[in-house]
Image: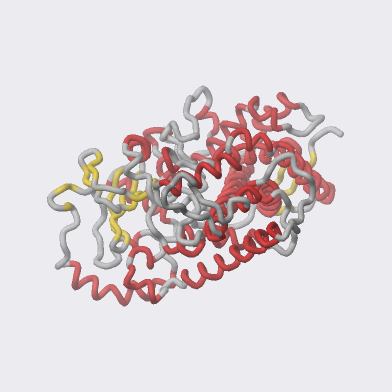
C-alpha cells in the first residue's frame, strides 16, 4: 500500500488486535468451504499484505495457498486466480457468472459512473458499447484501414531516430515510442494528431495509476469520506482534465471547426461517436436511453487510455528484454535481414512472415503482461468452483503475471527471457490458451488486442531492423534496471535509454 497509509495502519493495529479474537470465522460461508487464504485482520482484511507491487505479493502468497486463493480486501471477499487451469474455470467454464465488474471510485470519476466499456457492469449497455467500439475502431477491417497511418508515423519515427545516430546521442526510447504510439492512436481515434495544447500523456499515465491502485475507499466505505490516500482529489483533477479535452473536441465538431489535417480514407472513431449524441442507444427498446456527453466522454477515456498506454508499455518491456539479451536481438535482426533485406524498411505485410518476432512478443507478454491483474471481475451469483464456495459480489483477480511464471507450464527456466520456448508451440495469446492471457479471455477479453498487437509488432520490427542499439555509459546488459511501477498497467519505473546506430543500406 502507499506509504501514506502507514500511520493509519499503525493506529488501527490496536483495534484490530482486540477485535481479531472475536471475529467471525472466515473459512466458511454458512458451512460452505471458501478457498484457502492468509489470515485476515478486521476492517482491512488483507489490504496490508499487498505491498507496492500487488501482483508479486499475490504471486508469493499463491505458492503457499494455491491457485484459487481467498483474501479479504476490506469488506470485499476476493478470489485470486493464479494458474491456467483455474483461469479457464473462471473466464471460460463459468464466464457468464464472472463477466461483470465491481463498482469502484475511479470509474465513477474517470468514466462518469462506469459509462464506458472497461469498467461497465455486464449487461445490455456494455454489449452495445462494445459493439460500437469493435465496429468503428477495433475490428480486423478497421485495423487494416489504419495501415497507412501506422506506416507514415513509423517512417517519421525512424527518421527522427536516424538524425540522432551520427552524433552518438543517447536516446530516450520510452519517450520516442510514447510519441509515435500517441500519434498513431490520435489519428485512428480522432482523425488527427493532437496539437501541442493538448497534453494527453501525463493525464493518461495518472489515469492508469488511479484505475489500478487499491483504493481504500472501495474496500472500506466508511473511510471513504476521509480520503486517506488522497486518491479522490487526484481522480477529480484527472477526470476534469480529460473531460475538458473531450468537451473542447466535441464543441469544435459541433461548430464545424474540427482541425483535420487531411482528408482521411476512413471515418475516425471520435466522429462516429459524436454523431450518436442525443440519439437513443437502442431505438427498439421501450425505455429509450439517450446518449449524452457523459457517455461519449467515458467511452473516449477507455479507448484513449487503453490504446495510448498499454501499447507503449508493451513495446518498452520488449525492447528492454532485447537489450538485456543480445543473443535474442541478433536472432531477431537475422530474421529481419532474411525476410526483408537491408535495403528497405519493414512493411506491415511482412509481419506474418516474422515468426521469431512473434515468439519474442509472446515471451515479452508472458513475463511482462501489461495489466498483470487484468481488470477485476465480479461474481453475479453464488457459485461453487472445484468444491470452493464463491459468494455473490466477490471480486475476482486473475494474476496473469503469476500464470506466466508457472514452472509447471514453462519449466524451471520460467523466469528467463527465452523466446525459443514458443518454437513449434501451439500456445497463442488471443485468449484461447489460458497459459498465456495478457489480454484476458472470455466475454471481457480485450477487444483491442489486434490493433495493439499490430502496432506493437510494427514499431518493434522497425526499431530493431533499422538500428543497432547500445546501452549508455558502458552499461552491461544485466545491469539494466527492470523495476516496475504499479497501476492498472505496469510500465518501467524508469525510462529506457540507448544509443542507436543506423544499419540499413542506403
Camera sees residue 140: yes
Q: What is the residue that sits farthest to the right in this orientation?
A: 506
Residue 282 in the image, given as x and y percentages of width and height? 48, 46
Q: Quadrant of the C terminus?
A: top right
Task: Identify the image's colour scheme: rainbow, by chain, secondary structure or one colour.
Answer: secondary structure
Question: Quadrant of the image for the N terminus?
Answer: bottom left
Picture quadrant where residue 297 is located: bottom right
Instruction: Please name the residue shown 34% across and 45% down the image.
Output: 98
- The residue under the point 38% across, 66% down is 216
Kindly give the residue lying farthest to the top in the view shown.
Answer: 424
Observer-nearest of 415 and 142:
142
| x and y, in percent, of residue 14 in the image | 25, 75
Question: Which sits in the foreground, 248 or 450?
Answer: 248
Left or right: residue 255 compared with residue 126: right
Q: Is residue 479 visible?
A: no
**Residue toward you, 35 or 164:** 35
Picture coordinates of residue 71 (x, y %)? Answer: 29, 55
| Residue at x-position 50% and y-position 29% | 421
Amino acid at each position: 500500500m502507499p506509504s501514506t497509509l502507514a500511520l493509519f495502519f499503525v493506529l488501527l493495529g490496536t483495534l484490530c488486535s482486540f477485535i481479531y479474537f472475536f471475529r467471525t470465522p472466515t473459512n466458511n460461508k454458512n458451512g460452505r468451504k471458501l478457498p484457502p487464504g492468509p489470515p485476515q485482520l478486521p476492517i482491512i482484511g488483507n489490504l496490508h499484505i499487498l505491498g507496492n507491487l500487488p501482483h508479486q505479493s499475490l504471486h508469493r502468497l499463491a505458492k503457499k495457498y494455491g491457485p484459487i486463493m481467498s483474501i479479504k480486501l476490506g469488506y470485499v471477499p476476493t478470489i485470486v486466480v493464479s494458474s491456467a487451469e483455474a483461469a479457464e474455470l473462471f473466464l471460460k467454464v463459468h464466464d457468464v457468472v464472472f463477466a461483470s465488474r465491481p463498482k469502484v471510485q475511479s470509474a465513477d470519476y474517470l468514466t462518469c459512473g462506469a459509462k464506458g466499456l472497461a469498467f461497465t457492469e455486464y449487461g445490455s449497455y456494455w454489449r452495445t458499447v462494445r459493439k460500437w467500439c469493435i465496429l468503428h475502431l477495433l475490428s480486423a477491417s478497421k485495423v487494416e484501414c489504419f495501415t497507412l497511418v501506422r506506416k507514415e508515423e513509423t517512417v517519421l519515427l525512424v527518421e527522427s531516430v536516424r538524425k540522432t545516430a551520427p552524433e552518438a546521442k543517447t536516446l530516450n526510447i520510452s519517450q520516442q515510442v510514447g510519441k509515435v504510439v500517441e500519434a498513431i492512436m490520435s489519428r485512428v481515434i480522432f482523425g488527427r494528431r493532437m496539437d501541442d495544447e493538448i497534453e494527453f500523456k501525463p493525464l493518461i499515465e495518472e489515469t492508469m495509476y488511479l484505475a489500478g491502485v487499491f483504493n481504500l475507499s472501495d474496500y472500506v466505505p466508511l473511510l471513504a469520506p476521509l480520503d486517506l490516500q488522497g486518491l479522490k482529489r487526484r481522480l477529480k483533477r484527472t477526470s476534469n482534465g480529460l473531460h475538458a479535452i473531450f468537451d473542447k473536441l466535441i464543441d469544435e465538431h459541433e461548430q464545424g471547426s474540427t482541425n483535420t489535417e487531411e482528408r482521411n480514407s476512413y471515418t475516425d472513431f471520435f466522429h462516429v461517436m459524436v454523431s450518436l449524441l442525443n440519439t437513443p442507444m437502442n431505438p427498439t427498446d421501450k425505455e429509450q436511453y439517450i446518449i449524452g456527453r457523459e457517455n461519449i466522454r467515458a467511452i473516449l477515456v477507455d479507448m484513449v487510455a487503453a490504446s495510448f498506454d498499454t501499447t507503449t508499455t508493451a513495446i518498452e518491456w520488449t525492447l528492454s528484454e532485447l537489450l538485456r539479451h543480445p543473443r535474442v536481438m541478433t536472432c531477431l535482426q537475422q530474421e529481419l535481414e532474411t525476410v526483408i533485406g537491408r535495403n528497405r524498411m519493414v512493411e506491415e505485410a511482412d509481419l506474418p512472415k516474422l515468426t521469431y518476432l512473434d515468439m519474442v512478443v509472446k515471451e515479452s507478454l508472458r513475463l511482462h503482461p501489461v495489466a498483470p491483474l487484468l481488470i477485476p471481475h465480479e461474481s453475479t451469483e453464488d457459485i461453487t468452483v472445484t468444491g470452493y464456495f464463491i459468494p455473490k459480489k466477490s471480486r475476482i483477480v486473475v494474476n496473469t503475471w503469476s500464470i506466466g511464471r508457472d514452472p509447471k507450464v514453462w519449466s524451471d527456466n520460467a523466469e528467463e527471457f527465452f523466446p525459443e520456448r514458443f518454437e513449434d508451440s501451439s500456445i497463442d495469446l488471443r485468449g484461447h490458451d489460458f497459459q498465456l492471457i495478457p489480454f484476458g479471455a472470455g466475454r471481457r477479453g480485450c477487444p483491442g488486442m489486434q490493433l495493439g498487437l499490430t502496432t506493437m509488432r510494427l514499431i518493434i520490427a522497425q526499431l530493431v531492423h533499422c538500428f543497432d542499439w547500445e546501452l549508455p555509459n558502458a552499461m552491461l546488459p544485466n545491469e539494466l534496471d527492470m523495476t516496475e511501477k504499479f497501476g492498472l498497467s505496469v510500465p518501467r519505473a524508469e525510462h529506457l535509454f540507448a544509443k542507436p546506430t543506423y544499419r540499413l543500406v542506403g
